[in-house]
Image: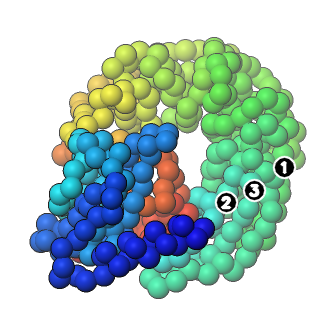
């Protein structure tokens, strides 16, 4: 500890006088990070290397970072919230430029879990360990006003009116009333065996799939008193997402089921009416009556093209063309907003603006303290990213 403190004192002495030449300690080198107008960027992270040669250093108030000598020549990423990350192929003692995003995130406060209801001024979230939270919020702050403990290991949530449905890892499906949002009440519990994840509900039918390993898609009927029974099962699917379009169940998988579509007009006798095989695409997600196909990971780059499948006629899906995006898309929120991971740095969660016709371009980024897929929902201009509530505003 004494040696570490002495080292930090030496660094501070070497970097104290702003007008003097910056001198790096022996075995280190200096990197500067500035805006496109040449202003220093404080708190930008320079990160790279693996195992024993991993490094992650933040710039000081003058945009200066002192890096260990083994980082020289290594590839690295430089990132900071509200700036476009950049990839450096061979790091050297020089000046690097980060460009500001067109819009900027302003931090409102901390949030637990992901949103299940996101109204003006009121936010309801739930987390994996069953925490249920009700918040009031505005542009300046967020305050928790109620909480409850629900069953643990929540995998997927769906809010249907005032009724909350959620699957658990291995404890079936629970259904709660949120008529009084401050005091959620359990309506019933389907003790469906085996691991669960994606599910779909229509009338008195529930379809469940296994997200961990291939297995039959199981179809259950249920009554409002909580009684349920398995009435059929079909196929051998590892299910990423499943949803009803009319009487047809859409199953999103990987590569060989993009999508699979079952006719459930008679739920006791499912019939496969379509199975899409897309070797150039990794998986996909649903938006309205469209399936958006995600290219394989190695194809994700600054201009990446996503395939659009029109499911309006479930028995005969059609190719609706392609559109571009500069992020690996997670969701399309509405006609002009999407969420993704910025192409050059998968840890940076991006908000994109555009359309299915003209494509989507990144307009704002949170790159600090996030992990891939750590998007918790939104009600633009408010977004939950990395366990925090942010407000998006013009630069």
Q: Which residue is mark 2?
A: 126
Location of residue 119 in the rendering, given as x and y in whole percent from the top left corner = 53, 71
Q: Is residue 265 left or right of residue 19?
A: right
Residue 331 in sight: no
Which numbered disc covers residue 188?
Answer: 1
Q: Choose the circle earlier in sequence order: 3 or 1.
A: 3
Q: Is residue 195 above or below residue 393?
A: above
Whether the residues at callouts 3 and 1 have beta carbons within 8 Å, the answer is no
Whether the residues at callouts 3 and 2 have beta carbons within 8 Å, the answer is yes
Q: Which of 138/43 is in front?
A: 43
Q: Nearer the viewer, mark 1 or mark 2?
A: 2
Q: Secondary structure at mark 1?
A: strand
Q: Is residue 280 left or right of residue 185?
A: left
Residue 173 in sight: yes
Q: Secondary structure at mark 2?
A: strand
Q: Is residue 141 left or right of residue 312?
A: right
Q: Which residue is mark 3?
A: 130
Classify 10 Å Cα crowding around label 3: few (below 14), some (14-19), many (20 and above): some
Task: Estimate the spatial distance between the alpha carbons at disc 1 and disc 2, rounded to whole Å.
Answer: 18 Å
């Amino acid at each position: 500890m004494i040696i570490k403190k002495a080292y930090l004192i030496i660094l501070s002495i070497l970097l104290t006088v702003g007008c003097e030449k910056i001198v790096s300690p022996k075995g280190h080198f200096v990197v500067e990070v500035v805006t496109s107008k040449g202003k220093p960027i404080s708190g930008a992270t320079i990160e790279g290397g693996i195992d024993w040669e991993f490094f992650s250093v933040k710039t000081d108030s003058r945009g200066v970072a002192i890096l260990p000598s083994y980082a020289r020549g290594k590839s690295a990423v430089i990132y900071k919230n509200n700036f476009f990350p950049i990839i450096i192929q061979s790091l050297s003692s020089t000046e690097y430029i980060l460009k500001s995003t067109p819009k900027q995130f302003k931090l409102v406060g901390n949030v637990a879990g992901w949103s299940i209801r996101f109204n003006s001024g009121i936010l309801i979230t739930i987390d994996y360990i069953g925490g249920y939270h009700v918040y009031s919020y505005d542009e300046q702050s967020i305050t928790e006003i109620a909480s409850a403990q629900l069953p643990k290991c929540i995998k997927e949530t769906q809010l249907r009116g005032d009724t909350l449905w959620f699957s658990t890892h291995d404890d079936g499906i629970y259904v709660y009333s949120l008529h009084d949002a401050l005091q959620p009440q359990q309506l019933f519990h389907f003790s469906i065996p085996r691991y669960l994840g994606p599910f779909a509900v229509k009338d008195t039918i529930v379809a469940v799939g296994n997200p961990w390993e291939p297995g039959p898609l199981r179809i259950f009927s249920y009554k409002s008193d909580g009684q349920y029974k398995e009435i059929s099962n079909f196929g051998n699917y590892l299910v990423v997402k499943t949803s009803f379009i009319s009487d047809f169940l859409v199953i999103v998988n990987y590569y060989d089921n993009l999508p699979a579509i079952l006719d459930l007009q008679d739920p006791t006798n499912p019939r496969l009416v379509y199975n899409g095989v897309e070797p150039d695409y990794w998986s996909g997600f649903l938006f309205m009556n469209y399936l958006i196909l995600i290219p394989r990971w190695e194809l994700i780059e600054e201009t990446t093209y996503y395939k659009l499948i029109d499911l309006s006629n479930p028995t005969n899906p059609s190719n609706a063309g392609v559109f571009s995006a500069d992020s690996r898309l997670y969701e399309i929120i509405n006609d002009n907003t999407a969420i993704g991971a910025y192409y050059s740095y998968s840890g940076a969660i991006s908000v994109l603006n555009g359309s299915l016709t003209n494509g989507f371009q990144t307009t704002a980024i949170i790159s600090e303290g996030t992990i891939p897929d750590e998007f918790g929902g939104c009600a633009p201009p408010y977004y939950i990213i990395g366990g925090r509530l942010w407000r998006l505003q013009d630069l």
